[in-house]
Image: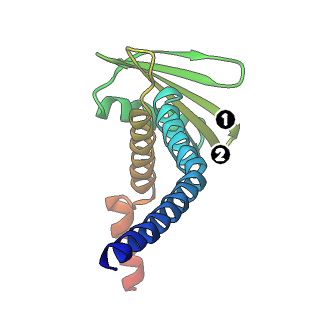
Amino acid sequence: MDAYCDAAQRGQMARYGILLLVGLCLLLAACEPVAIALLGGGVTTVLRYNLDGVAARTFTAPPASVKTASLAALQRMGLTLEGTENLEASEIIRARSPNREIEIELEPITEQLTRMRITARSTSLLYDNATAVELVQQTEKMLDAALTAKLAPTGAAALGASRLSAN
């Protein structure tokens, strides 16, 4: 009887094993499209990040102020200015580092609104989105510093204002 029970248990375990295996295969088959989609999305993001390398931002500032801030950001980041080019509706600023080519496009939208588009190319076929984004952030810092300096009262004006408030 013991031999019969062992065979019966083995048969039952084999059936459960097959059911478990089929169930796992069904689960894995259902997850495959999701896994492939997630993997594909991750690859697309990585490729997009490295292939387009474009950062864009619109500033509430006149084009001349954004240009000045962009040039200051280039200098702060140690990039060499190669030149500027005026187009019909925008201005292009070109700069470089030993292994990057930077192109900044400034497009006036209104007198007080300027769109900035930065492309950073590495020496290979890939683009460098991180450098483009950093250049946008540095330009924003330069614009903020210029605005703060413009809004801060000068020494004489502050002294006069404090005398008026004391009276």
Label 1: few (<14), some (14–19) or many (≥20) C-alpha neighbours in 10 Å? many
On the image, the x and y values in percent for residue 16 come to 48, 68
On the image, the x and y values in percent for residue 162 come to 36, 76
Q: Quadrant of residue 157?
A: bottom left
Q: Which mark is residue 36?
A: none
In this rendering, position of residue 120 left or right of residue 33: left
In this rendering, position of residue 115 left or right of residue 109: left
Residue 138 or residue 66, whichever sits in front: 138
Say which residue label 2 marks: 112
Residue 115 or residue 157, whichever sits in front: 115
On the image, the x and y values in percent for residue 90 come to 65, 25
Marker count (numbered): 2
Name the residue: 53% across, 28% down: 52
Q: Residue furthest bottom?
A: 167
Residue 90 or residue 41, whichever sits in front: 41
Quadrant the C terminus occupies: bottom left
User: How far separated are the C-alphas under marks 2 and 1?
Assistant: 8 Å
Quadrant the N terminus occupies: bottom left
Name the residue: 39% across, 50% down: 145
Q: Nearer the viewer, mark 2 or mark 1?
A: 1
Whether residues under marks 2 and 1 lie with C-beta atoms below 8 angstroms apart, the answer is: no
Tag 1, which secondary structure? Answer: strand
On the image, the x and y values in percent for residue 128 come to 42, 29
Q: Label 2 amino acid?
A: Gln
Say which residue label 1 marks: 108
Label 2: few (<14), some (14–19) or many (≥20) C-alpha neighbours in 10 Å? few
Name the residue: 60% across, 55% down: 30
Residue 167 or residue 103, whichever sits in front: 103
In this rendering, position of residue 68 left or right of residue 87: left
In this rendering, position of residue 87 left or right of residue 34: right
